[in-house]
Image (cartoon, rainbow, N blue to C red):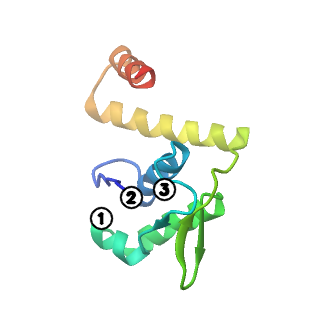
Amino acid sequence: MIVEIDVEAPLPPYEQLRTQIAALIRTGELKEGVRLPSIRQLAGDLGLASGTVARAYRELESAGYLRGRVGHGTVVRAIPEMTDKERDTRLAEAARAYATAVRELGVDLDAALLAARRQLAG
C-alpha cells in the first residue's frame, strides 16, 4: 500500500490517509481481505502519530471499508455502497481542499478549472 502525506496540505493528515486508502479500495488496488499494516507500523512508516492513523482506520471502519479485530489486524472489506449524501459530502470536501490549494498557489479560476478538467479526463 503506497500512500503519501503532505504536511503542508490544507487537509489534515488523518483525512489524507483516509481518502487515499478509500481510493485504493474503490479502485481495486486494495482488494477485499487484504490485511493493512498495524497502526504503529503505518504511523512509523509515514512519520505520523499513532492516533492519526487510528483515527483514519476508525473512520474507514465506520464507513464500511475496513474491519478491525484485536489480535487479527485490520482487513479490507468489500467496497461499501456510497449514499448520495455521502458522495455529495465527499465531493464538497474535495472541492474545498482543491479551492484552498488553488488560492494558496495564486492560480486564476480558468487555469484551475483547466487543470481539474485534465485530471478528470485522464
Indicate the position of residue 99 as horizontal and vertical percent values. Answer: 42, 32
Q: Is residue 69 above or below residue 114?
A: below
Q: Residue at x 52, y 66 (%)?
A: 57
Dot 2: what SS? helix
Q: Nearer the viewer, mark 2 or mark 3?
A: 3
Indicate the position of residue 40 as horizontal and vertical percent values. Answer: 38, 77
Q: How many marks?
A: 3
Dot 1: what SS? helix
- Gap in angstroms between the C-alphas marked 1 and 2: 10 Å
Q: Hey, which quadrant is residue 118 in on the image? A: top left
Residue pointed to by mark 1 = 46
Residue pointed to by mark 2 = 13
Q: Amino acid at mark 1?
A: Leu
Q: Residue at x 56, y 68 (%)?
A: 58
Kindly check if marks 1 and 2 are in contact, taking CB atoms under 8 A apart as contact: yes
Residue pointed to by mark 3 = 18
Dot 3: what SS? helix
Kindly check if marks 2 and 3 are in contact, taking CB atoms under 8 A apart as contact: no
